[in-house]
Image (cartoon, rainbow, N blue to C red):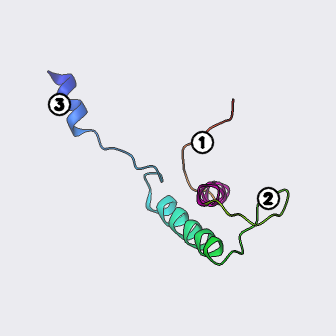
Amino acid sequence: MRFLTDMATKKKQSSSGSDPKSKRIVKNKMATVMDEFKHKQLKSGKSGQKVTNQKQAVAIGLSEARKSGAKLPPAKKKK
């Protein structure tokens, strides 16, 4: 019975970290990256080509937020 009450009282952590600083970093980075994507100014890292895929733009934004110090789960690795 105690196990069920512990699970009900546990607070879920959001994907952008639990502290307000992480949320603020993610929100600001994603806003700038998506604005660059919308205006076709966002370029990928190594090749420097323009990004045309929205999912790739989101991945770039999350990566930049991690580099800025936001506490996010690690990126999924390719197999």
Q: Say whether disc 3 or disc 2 marks the residue closer to the N-terminus.
A: 3
Q: Which residue is at the front of the view, 20 or 41?
A: 41
Question: In front: mark 1 or mark 2?
Answer: 2
Q: Which disc, if any, is residue 44?
A: none
The image shows a total of numbered marks equal to 3
Q: Secondary structure at mark 1?
A: loop
Q: The disc labelled 3 sits on which kind of residue?
A: Thr
Q: The disc labelled 2 sits on which kind of residue?
A: Gly
Boundaries of the magenta span: 54-67
Q: Say whether disc 1 or disc 3 marks the residue closer to the N-terminus.
A: 3
Which residue is label 2 attached to?
45
Picture quadrant of residue 12:
top left
Q: Which disc, if any, is residue 5?
A: 3
CB contact under 8 Å: marks 1 and 2: no
Q: Secondary structure at mark 2?
A: loop
Q: Quadrant of the C terminus?
A: top right
Which residue is label 1 attached to?
74
Picture residue at 60% right of the left edge, 75% below the top = 35
Question: In front: mark 1 or mark 3?
Answer: 1
Q: The disc labelled 1 sits on which kind of residue?
A: Pro
Question: In front: mark 3 or mark 2?
Answer: 2
Horizontal and vertical percent position of residue 17: 47, 51
Horizontal and vertical percent position of residue 45: 79, 59
Q: Main secondary structure of the magenta part?
A: helix
Badge 2 density bin: few <14, some 14–19, many ≥20, Cα 10 Å: few
Q: Is residue 44 left or right of residue 33?
A: right
Task: Using the numbered discs, state the Cα–Cα distance from disc 1 to disc 2 in whole angstroms.
Answer: 19 Å
Picture residue at 66% right of the left edge, 36% below the top = 77
Q: Quadrant of the N terminus?
A: top left
